């Protein structure tokens, strides 16, 4: 079976070829006759059925398709007969040994907010609730020792702080920072995700002194943010966050511009243009990234309060923003700090960096990692997990006994079994699909049903990214390389 996807972007015609992952511009004639030719119709039959196309043009298009097939291995029968991922114990141990570089410490499960859409609230079926559980100093130090003892080949280390609300444990943050800096001469980066409500001048100055990458959660202007982001007592929180942002800018504007990003949860009723205006406003706009995502819509009762029509409205509003994004690209406005880049540009960068070319008959699932190699999430008790997105599910060991290689291999094998059962090998987007453990996880296992539920939106998202990527490369060819560099 030959797998491909063809599409039109701004009156130009494109072909994405699955077996090579090449994306090429094609003629309108190739676009019009490709399905017939690949479907096995004879050239004379194609000519007789496409009376609106000149015979010579069809013959020329057929010659070009055959050239693609011969010279570039494009539009070949799919060579793939399965997925390949290193699951032998020795392979995993070799990857994990001395290559750790990034830990995220879940230093508390406690939080001073009770956001209505929070995954740790009561609307998500398989998630933990907020609790007065904290990582003690001994566990935090042992977590850092675990990182240091398994990172000899890593040139740079990253320690992230997560919660709950991690600033509730500011003294522990300082203890961890002081400890790791006293134990290694390597460069250490620090990051923290926060609701921003507990950050006063003393805390800000500490974060600046240690070049922390801050991600502050804010959902837009007051009327949007305050709908769901409530304090533990049910009060609005917007003006506390804005006060923090203003204070950071006042103390060190350069730090704010480069080191303070935002996490945005997009939830209905949708007002995407208002978000665009807010994050482009003078009081907010900077050079750091924005991470904007829909409130998770799987295994939750949160969306039950809204009519199904919200998704039609969301799609319409998103297309309005996409048009603005395309206009900026067309006019060569590098808008990489805005909400627009978060919604459209970041995904195009990932597509730009995809591996391509023919690489044999086994596929490497693009969306997953070897758990523990690139990042390790450590909970309050010192248990190891894949990442903060997977959360406290699918344990892969603990800081005392180390990584559980058998569990890691089983997790990889379970995911490969899920995508095999789902028939992902037959999808034209199999080489660029970002599906990972998160998309298949249901409670403490990986589920074909969960992956199946997320598949349609993933496919639609990939189609949109291909369209955006084609538009960017035709309108501003060097933009993505500039952004990456």
Image (cartoon, rainbow, N blue to C red):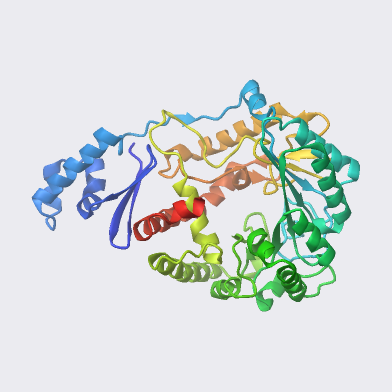
In this rendering, the count of numbered labels is: 0
Write the residue at 60% across / 74% down. Answer: 278
Between 436 and 107, the residue placed more toward the observer is: 107
User: Residue 477 location in percent, x, y?
Assistant: 37, 55
- The extreme bottom residue here reads 223
When the figure is inspected, residue 143 is found, relative to residue 327, above or below; the finding is above
In the picture provided, is 52 more to the left or to the right than 20?
A: left
In the picture provided, is 269 more to the left or to the right than 150?
A: left
User: Residue 393 location in percent, x, y?
Assistant: 73, 43
Q: Quadrant of residue 92?
A: top right
User: Is residue 29 in view from this perspective?
Assistant: yes
Between 190 and 216, the residue placed more toward the observer is: 190
Q: Quadrant of residue 261?
A: bottom right
Write the residue at 25% across / 41% down. Answer: 38
Between 32 and 331, the residue placed more toward the observer is: 331
Between 427 and 352, the residue placed more toward the observer is: 352
User: Residue 215 location in percent, x, y?
Assistant: 69, 59
Q: Quadrant of residue 428?
A: top left
Looking at the rendered image, the quarter that the N terminus falls into is: top left
User: Residue 31 location in percent, x, y?
Assistant: 25, 52
Write the residue at 45% across / 70% down. Answer: 324
């Amino acid at each position: 079976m030959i797998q491909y996807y063809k599409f039109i972007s701004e009156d130009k015609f494109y072909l994405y070829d699955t077996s090579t992952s090449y994306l090429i511009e094609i003629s309108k004639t190739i676009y019009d006759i490709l399905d017939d030719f690949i479907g096995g119709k004879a050239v004379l039959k194609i000519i007789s059925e496409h009376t609106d196309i000149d015979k010579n043009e069809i013959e020329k298009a057929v010659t070009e398709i055959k050239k693609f097939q011969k010279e570039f291995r494009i539009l070949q029968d799919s060579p793939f007969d399965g997925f390949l991922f290193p699951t032998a114990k020795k392979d995993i141990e070799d990857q994990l040994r001395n290559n750790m570089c990034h830990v995220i410490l879940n230093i508390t499960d406690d939080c001073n907010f009770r956001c209505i859409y929070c995954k740790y609230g009561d609307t998500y079926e398989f998630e933990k609730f907020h609790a007065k559980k904290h990582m003690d100093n001994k566990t935090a130090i042992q977590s850092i020792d675990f990182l240091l003892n398994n990172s000899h080949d890593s040139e740079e280390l990253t320690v992230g702080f997560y919660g709950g609300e991690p600033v509730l444990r500011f003294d522990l943050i300082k203890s961890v920072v002081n400890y790791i800096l006293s134990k290694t001469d390597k460069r250490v980066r620090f990051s923290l995700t926060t609701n921003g409500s507990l950050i006063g001048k003393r805390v800000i100055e500490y974060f600046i002194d240690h070049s922390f990458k801050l991600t502050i959660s804010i959902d837009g202007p007051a009327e949007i943010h305050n709908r769901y982001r409530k304090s533990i007592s049910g009060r609005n929180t917007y003006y506390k966050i804005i006060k923090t942002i203003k204070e950071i800018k006042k103390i060190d504007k350069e730090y704010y511009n480069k080191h303070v990003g935002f996490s945005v949860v997009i939830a209905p009723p949708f007002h995407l243009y208002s978000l665009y205006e807010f994050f482009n406003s003078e009081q907010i706009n900077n050079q750091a990234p924005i991470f904007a995502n829909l409130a998770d819509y799987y295994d939750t009762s949160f969306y039950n309060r809204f009519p199904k029509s919200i998704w039609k409205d969301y799609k319409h509003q998103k297309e309005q923003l996409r048009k603005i994004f395309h206009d900026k690209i067309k006019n060569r406005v590098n808008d990489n700090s805005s909400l627009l880049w978060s919604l459209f540009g970041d995904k195009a960068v990932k597509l730009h960096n995809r591996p391509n070319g023919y690489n044999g008959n086994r596929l490497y699932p693009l969306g997953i990692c070897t758990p523990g190699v690139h990042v390790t999430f450590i909970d309050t008790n010192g248990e190891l997990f894949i990442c903060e997105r997977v959360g406290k599910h699918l344990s892969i060991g603990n800081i005392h006994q180390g990584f559980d290689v058998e569990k890691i291999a089983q997790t990889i094998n379970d995911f490969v079994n899920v995508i095999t059962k789902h028939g992902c090998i037959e999808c034209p987007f199999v080489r660029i699909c970002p599906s990972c453990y998160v998309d298949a996880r249901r409670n403490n296992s990986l589920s074909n049903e969960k992956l199946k539920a997320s598949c349609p939106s993933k496919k639609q998202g990939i189609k949109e990214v291909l369209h955006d990527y084609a538009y960017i490369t035709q309108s501003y060819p060097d933009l993505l390389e500039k952004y990456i560099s």
